[in-house]
Each structure stands twice: as structure tokens, then as C-alpha cells.
Amino acid sequence: MKFIRVNMSNKTIKVDDVPEKYEGLGGRSLTSTIVNEEVPPKCDPLGPENKLIFAPGTLSGTTMINTSRISVGSKSPLTGGIKESNAGGTIGAAVAKLGIAAIVIEGKAPEGEFHLLQIDIDGNVALSPAEEYKGMRTYKTVEGLLEKYGKKNSVMCIGPAGEFLLKSSSIQASDVDGRPCRAAGRGGLGAVMGSKGLKALVVAQGGKEKAPVADPERFKKAVKEIIDAIKEDPFSGQVMPNLGTAALVAPVNSMGGFPTYNGRQGVLEGWEKISGEAIAEIIKKRGGNTTHMGCSQCIIHCSNEYVDEKGKYVTSSLEYETIWAIGGMSGVVDIDTIAQFDFMCDDIGLDTMNTGVAIAVAMDSGYREFGDKKAVIEMTEEIAQGTEFGRILGNGPASVGKHFNNPRVPVVKNQSIAAYDPRALQGNGVTYATTPMGADHTAANLVGAYIGQQLDPLSPEGQVEASRNLQYTMAVADATGMCMMAALSLLSPEASEAFRSAISAKTGKEIKPEDFPSAMGIQIIKTEKEFNRKAGLTNKDDRLPDMFTKEPLPPHNTVFKISDEELDLTFNF
């Protein structure tokens, strides 16, 4: 496997074998290790000393299903700490199949200068000017790149938000249909890419250099067992293909944990109009697709293609977190508006969650009324235009709260929470507070344990342990390139054993059952927390804002009950 280092300051490219100290690592384990080893923790995230790393998982490029995600790592301009944000689509598999373990972007081009990084089918790497794409939104950028380089390429690019260096900017990845509707959304890494002067990566698909597998027969057996586990799991095998992640709208509202009107209540009046069931019915009626395959080697098909009343494509995939960010937090119970917002964020290059919550904080501050559909679209467009207020919005909820002097800002480390209120789903609050990444549900989302009644969502009992254990598991999944939907299907003892066997067979290094996944997960999170400590973050940053500990949430009228002392014991390494 190869390491590609691109220095944007002097436009040099180096292709070497993987350094010995990074051998066996992939995805999040590799990006976080490189950041901790090579990035000065006190550096300016948008300066030349920061690095931006793209790394497929250790299982990416193999026959393992649902492992096409790519990790993007850096020091975050949003949180001030370490960040791994990952995206689906096709580029993770494309990079891995070219025998590339990581692409490391270093230095910084002169201000206002943008380039493309292209890797062809033979693995040749070239850096070229991207002046014609400067200021362009992502759909037009990808369309132009695929027309120039050919349809059998994968693209990751930034839009205007990344060029403006906004802290909610995303890096958009193309899906199997060549549309930039998959995102490395969190942490503002689009701004880091913009600061480097890199507009896009263009990577050839169909590379012939297969990722090496130490024990092919054992690996083949594990792949079959994991396929069976995913298909037999009720959520990934039945619910996801039919309703996608939007299936969660109904159960989370029924639990009173759907943050609404900037977290003033836990149930959205009219949520039925934006539920997974309602969306599926609209898509079918209009001739869209409810079981779209968005990512390479996916067998779940949780994506969808939302179309307008004339059957014209609007966006893919309309997901639960986006539905909540505008539907719940801003009180907009109109699915067409939410779909338009989703497309605009993808096109501008914005994290839908951080942007939606920023709009909700503005509404909560009296700037616009909750439920104002027109205001949502106008405010999002302001970000694309780079207006003064657009930049405030594009820098996220904390920026908006500061502007309006509104303390009701639902963030941890400046990153917005996800679609699960920590007062009603206590363990998700532990995850928001303690993950090194800022408030991030993908680090350990316990909603499945609550729906399955394995854990009481309103009780503080067992929440720290549950969050800790799942954070270890998800760190390992992120290291392998496995998508979250598939990884959550592998929590049973039998499926987890197949996952352990697959990783051991791939690397040739046996992982002991008692060490999986905890030992691997501990090492990743320990590395990330070490960087954050050196960057100046303390346990005081591992806290939820006062609105969650002091304001009771209707309908249960509960607050977040887990003490600071308990939070500090989550990772007592």
C-alpha cells in the first residue's frame, strides 16, 4: 500500500510505501494517528502546519460489503481539537483499490489559488490549477470534472462554504451515480481543504491492485457471516431498505427525545408529515426511489432519491439528521422545504446538522419565526453568497449564539448535537460530552438500545458504560471503513466474532477475543484524547451546555442527570 504526500506550498508530490509506524492502520485509526504524530497541536487549523488526511479503512478495497467509507482527518477549525469525519459514496473503495493507504495534504497554497489532485487508473498523481472551478458549487463542479476525466472517477470536493473557510463547511463525495450527495460533514474540514487551496480530488475507479488479505479463506467465510448478520438484522435488513434513516422520526418522537424549536420540547407537533413513512409514500407517488444504492458494495440500500411533484430529482439521500435539523429544530413540517435545504447544503458544501441548528438558534433569538419555510431557504442562500450574516450562520450555532447573545446553544466543543435530546436519551448525552470529536452521534448512538428496551433512556444508570463500550466499537468500525448502519448490525456476539475474524484474516495479526473491540477502540480514542489535551482542551470541554442540565424537557420534564464526575470516568485510561 502507498502513502501519497502532497505539499500545497511548493506543489510537490511524494509517493512512498506506508511508513512502518503506520502499518496495519486504516480509516480513523490512521488519520488520528497521523494528526497526533505530525500536526502541532497548537497550530492554526487553517494554517500551513495543519494537515488534511484522506484514508480508506483497513477493509476497504476488499470483498467485504459496506466498507467503502473514507475517513478525513485533521485539526478541526470548529472544535479546536482532533477530527475524523467520514463519507460514503465511491471514493473510499476507489482509493483503496489503487493500493493507496492515505493521501496527506500538507502546506498551503497562496491565498485565492485552487488546485485539483487527480489520481489515474495507473496510480499516477497530478496536481493542476482549478481556476475554472473556483467559486463553483459542488454539483456543477462534479459534473464538470466527470465530463473532463470520465464517468469512471470518484470525486471529493468543496463548495463556496469551504472556499469561504466557514466552520460548518463539508467535503462532498460523489455517490454511485456521480452526484456529490455524500458528505464528510462534521468539524469544518471543508474549511481546512479550502485553506490548503485544494478544490477537489478526482480518483479513478476500478483499480486492479486489490488490498492484500493475509488469510483469504478465513476472510471469505467472515464476509459471508457478516452478510447474513446484516440481512437477518430487523433494522438493517428490513427497516433501512424501506424507510432509510428517516425511520427514526417516529420512535424518537414517541420517546419524547426529538429536539424541537431549538431544544424547547421533545416532540414536534406534526412530525407525522416528515416521518420516514410519509417520505417513502411521497417518493413512491412521485416516481422516486426509496431503495437507492448510494455507496459502493452496499447491501443495505438505506439511501433514497427524493423528487419533486414533476418527478425531477431534488436530493439523495434525505436522512434523519437533516430532517431533524430543519424539521425539528426550526419547526418546519414541510418535506419539500427540507429536501430543498438538503440539496442546497450539499451544493454549497455545508454540514446539514450544524447549519440547521445555526438557523434554529437564529430563530430562537427572534431573527425569524420558527416554522418559516421561506426564511430557511433565504438564510441558507445567504451562506452561499458570503454575506455578513451568511458567514455568521456558516460558522455554526455557537457563532450565531454569540452574535445574538443567546446562551441557548446546543453544542459541545462548538459542534451541534444530533437528533437525540440528551435529557430524554441520557446515554447519547454522555457520547456528545465525552467523544473527542465534539457532539457527534456517530461516535456511539444508543437509540437502538432504547428502542429495544435494553436500557432505560431516562435513567442515568448504565449510560456511561453503554456509551463507553459503543464508542470503542464505533472507533473500530471507523478504522475499517465499515458504515455505521452495518456496524450496528454486528453487535451480537456471533456477528462481532465474525467481524473480529475478518480483521484478523485481513491483517494476518490475530486479535484476541477478549481484546475486541475494546483494546483497538481504546488505542484510537486514547490517541485522540492525547492530541486534544496537547491542543489545550480539558475535561471542562467535555460538558453539555446549561440548557440540558437546567431546563426540563417536555413531555417528560427531565434534565440531563449524569454528573461531571461520572462523565470524567468515561475514559479513565
Image (cartoon, rainbow, N blue to C red):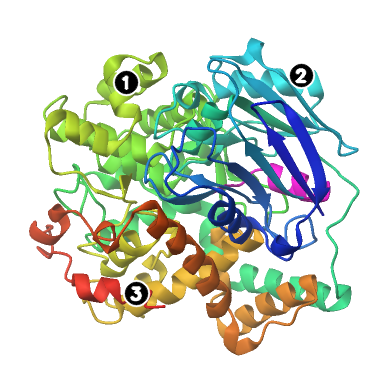
Q: Nearer the viewer, mark 1 or mark 3?
A: 3
Q: Position of residue 411 (x, y in %)?
A: 27, 48
Q: Which residue is mark 1?
A: 390
Q: Residue at x 51, y 60 (%)?
A: 239
Residue type (three-letter) at the residue carrying disc 2? Glu
Q: CA distance from mark 2 to mark 1?
A: 32 Å
Q: Position of residue 37 (x, y in %)?
A: 58, 56
Q: Residue at x 62, y 52 (%)?
A: 301
Q: Is residue 399 left or right of residue 479?
A: left
Q: CA distance from mark 2 to mark 3?
A: 50 Å
Q: Few, some or many C-alpha atoms within 10 Å of disc 1 (few <14, some 14-19, many ≥20)?
A: some
Magenta stretch in the rendered image: 86-100
Residue type (three-letter) at the residue carrying disc 1? Gly
Q: Which residue is mark 2?
A: 147
- SS at mark 2? helix
Q: Residue at x 41, y 64 (%)?
A: 445
Q: Is residue 213 left or right of residue 561?
A: right
- Which quadrant of the structure image shows residue 149? top right
Q: Which one is earlier in the sequence, the residue at label 1 or at label 3?
A: 1
Residue 570's label in the rendered image is 3
